[in-house]
Structure formats: C-alpha cells, structure tokens
Image: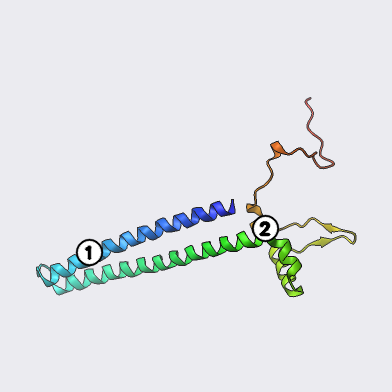
C-alpha cells in the first residue's frame, strides 16, 4: 500500500511537471510574439513592451521554481520508496548487525515512544513508526486463528 501511494504521488508529480513544461512553453511563445510585435512589427510602444515582458518573465520564473520543486519532490519520493523497500523487510537483520548507537536510532525510528518492559517481558508499544501502518494486514475472513482471550463472539439474542 505504501508503494502504491508512493507510485500514485510519483505519477501525480510527473503530470505536474508535464503541465508546468507545457505552461512554460506557452509563456515562451508569448514572449516570442511580444518581441516580434515590438521589434519587427513595431505595433507596441516600449512601455507596453517592458510591462508585458516583465509580467511574462515573472510568470516563467515562478513556473521554473515550481518545476524545480516538483523535480526535487519526485526524487525524494523515489528515494523514500527505495529506502522503505530495503529497510522495512530487513529490520531484524539491520538490528542484528547494528552497533549500540545504531540500535538506539533504529528503536527510536520504529518505536518513537520506546518499548515497554514490565520486568518479565516486553509489553506492546503504544506507538510505532507510521511506515508500519502501510504494511498489508491479514484478511480477517481468511484467518483461521481464534480471537484473543477475553473477546467472546456476539450471540444472537
């Protein structure tokens, strides 16, 4: 599910980039026509030319900034997905191979509020990393396990 959302965001960014490129091309064509009207046809005065040119250049610059930001976000999405695909399935291997400092950092990453220990065993943690929310869960209709103790099925009245 995480990968699906990431791929959807990546596709959305690609569409945004294509749209920005289309808009930039249209603005560049307007600038070319403006230059042609001023330089060759001499149909507009210098003040009108400067005003329109400045406005179009400003629009083009803002589009280029948006394009750059979208490209950076696209690379960030790809990097995050690649990292998640490598790290999440191998979390236990990373733990075994990690130094004490790295283990503490991994624990903070996966269990932000820590892991509770009641003196005999580890107790379920309250909060885990958001990445775990995107892992697929077992379909309860195909689960052959009994429900946890204390939870009785509802009986018809």
- Labels 1, 2: front one: 2
Report which quarter residue 118 is drawn in. Answer: bottom right
Q: Nearer the viewer, residue 140 or 85?
A: 85
Q: In the picture shown, does residue 6 fall above or below 36?
A: above
* Residue 101 drawn at (x, y percent): 74, 74
Q: Residue at x 41, y 68 (%)?
A: 68
Mark 1 lies on a secondary structure that is helix
Query: Percent position (x, y) of residue 106?
Result: 71, 67
User: How many numbered badges does the structure rendering display?
Assistant: 2
Query: Which secondary structure, mark 2?
Result: helix
Q: Is residue 95 above or below residue 125?
A: below
Regarding residue 111, the answer to whether it shows in the image is: no
Q: Quick check: 66 above or below 101?
A: above
Choose top left, top right, bottom left or bottom right for residue 65: bottom left
- Is the Cβ of the residue at disc 1 closer than 8 Å to that at disc 2? no
- Considering every residue shown, the one lying at the far right of the view is 120
> Residue under circle 2?
89
Q: Is residue 150 found left or right of 92 in the rendered image? A: right
Which residue appears at 36% of the width and 68% of the height? 64
Q: Earlier in the sequence, mark 1 or mark 2?
A: 1
Residue 13 coordinates in the image, percent (x, y): 44, 58
**Numbered badge on residue 82:** none
Apparent side of residue 84 relative to residue 66 in the rendered image (left or right): right
Rate crowding at label 1 as few (under 14), some (14 to 19) or many (20 or more) other CA atoms within 10 Å: some
Task: Kindly tell me whether residue 33 is visible in this rendering.
Answer: yes
The Cα–Cα distance between marks 1 and 2, rounded to whole angstroms, is 52 Å
Residue for badge 1:
30
């Amino acid at each position: 599910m995480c990968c699906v959302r990431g791929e959807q965001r990546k596709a959305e960014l690609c569409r945004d980039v294509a749209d920005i490129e289309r808009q930039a091309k249209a603005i560049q064509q307007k600038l070319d026509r403006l230059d042609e009207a001023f330089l060759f046809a001499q149909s507009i005065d210098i003040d009108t030319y400067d005003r329109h040119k400045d406005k179009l250049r400003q629009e083009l610059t803002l589009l280029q900034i948006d394009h750059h930001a979208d490209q950076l976000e696209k690379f960030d999405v790809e990097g995050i997905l690649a990292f998640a695909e490598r790290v999440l399935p191998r979390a236990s291997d990373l733990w075994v191979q990690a130094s004490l400092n790295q283990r503490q950092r991994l624990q903070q990453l996966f269990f932000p509020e820590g892991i509770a220990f009641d003196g005999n065993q580890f107790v379920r943690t309250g909060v885990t990393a958001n990445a775990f929310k995107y892992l697929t869960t077992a379909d309860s209709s195909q689960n052959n396990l009994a429900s946890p103790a204390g939870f009785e099925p509802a009986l018809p009245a």
